[in-house]
Image (cartoon, helix red, strand yellow):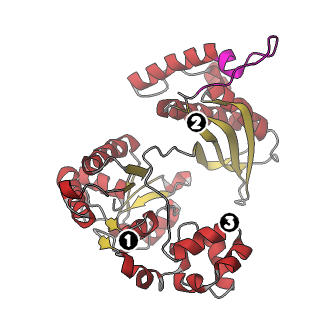
Amino acid sequence: MDAFYASVELRERPELAGRPVCVGGAAAGRGVIAAASYAARAFGVRSAMPTARAQALCPDLVLLPPNFDLYTAVSREIMAIFRRYTPLVEPLSLDEAFLDVRGTERLFGDAVAVGRAIKSDVLRETGLVASVGVAPSKFLAKLASDLDKPDGFRVVFAEEVRALLDPLPVSKIFGVGERTAKRLESLGVHTIGQLASLSRADVQRRFGASGLWIHDLAHGIDERRVSTNRVEKSHGKERTFEQDVVDREDLRRRLYGFAEEVAFELRDRGLRGRTVTLKARYPDFHTITRSRTLDHATNLGPRIFAVARELFERIPFGPLRLLGISVSHLEDVRGPAQGQLFEGAAAPAPVADGRLERAQAGLDRLRKKYGGPQVQMGTSLSTPERR
């Protein structure tokens, strides 16, 4: 989808058509841009840019707060359109997905016809514009979908792969981030064609297993299949504070709130995780992370907070600009929970957490019914609030 969050907001506010619109946090709160309309991009505004910088580039910028409930609802409409054409849909995010349309030719025509039909359906039914890439592999289809934005439609046939890839910068390869791109440039490799001309063994020797991956992609080789049961790898919550926070008790309280939010989202998705990671950023932008992996996966806020707090106590004391928690090594809650083999052993965490799980389930029902944390643990309140 083209500038998805911003495009949804423009659909809801037609009076803003043609104006530079962004979705993001306020500059006073050290917010960042989550999405920028193409009118805003003309001024150099981009997603992940600090809002203060965006407003300096575009003084007439219209900044709107994010409405993720709305974006999620629209995303479901779009994914439903995809699934009318094929059951093999792999969502990457709210606004992007891979589709495998092999085997649907007798119903809908070839892949090009399906791509055009989907693009038309999305526009007619949601009022939003999608860019479509059609290609023999996931990497090439993703690349093609980005080439002619906005309102793009690009088809890459097998015989065109080399001509398409060779002149593109190496940063276009999935998995080549800023650091890898700089290492490649130090070797005189600036384009995908130059990377493809290197021997596979040499790239592997310099970059390890990831070298094999990027070398294959430089040749257009991507054997990944479209997966309909793609599992989220991690889920987290972080916040940049309006002002640096030094009070340790205040930071612990915020940390508890993050843990509860992450836990609620995990339960809502039917997931639990084993690894808890703490992220902290200091005023000089120095960022540190600390992680701990549990014996038993969890999606309970107090359990996540207990680990996060232990990690928090191990980081250097000082004011923080940002604080966050994430949970990874996720698994489906329907999977089996490991019990104890011998009598007399300590009770396994899944059993010991039974009462807490029932309490959390009750709180979840209230939260879903009334739209917010109507009932909270006392730990999440400041001392004056408790009094």
In what quadrant of the picture does the C terminus appear? top right
Find out whether the residues at labels 2 and 1 contact each other: C-beta distance under 8 Å. Answer: no
Crowding at dot 3, Cα within 10 Å, few <14 / some 14-19 / many 20+, comes out as few
Q: In this view, does 186 lie above or below 63?
A: below
Dominant secondary structure of the residues highlighted in magenta in the image:
loop
Spatial distance from mark 2 to mark 1, Cα to Cα? Answer: 32 Å
**Which sits earlier in the primary sequence, circle 1 or circle 3?**
1
To which residue does mark 3 refer? 209
Find out whether the residues at labels 3 and 2 contact each other: C-beta distance under 8 Å. Answer: no
Query: Outermost residue, left direction?
Result: 124
**Which sits earlier in the primary sequence, circle 3 or circle 2?**
3
To which residue does mark 1 refer? 144
Q: How many numbered marks appear?
A: 3
Please report the residue visible at 62 percent of the width from the left and 76 percent of the height from the top: 181
| Front in this rendered view, residue 90 or 301 | 90
Magenta-drawn stretch contains 130: no
Residue 113 x/y as whole percent: 21, 64
To which residue does mark 2 refer? 331
Identify residue type, mark 3. Ala
Q: What residue span does the magenta drawing correspond to?
A: 336-353
In what quadrant of the picture does the N terminus appear? bottom left
Q: Is residue 267 above or below residue 45?
A: above
Residue 101 x/y as whole percent: 31, 57
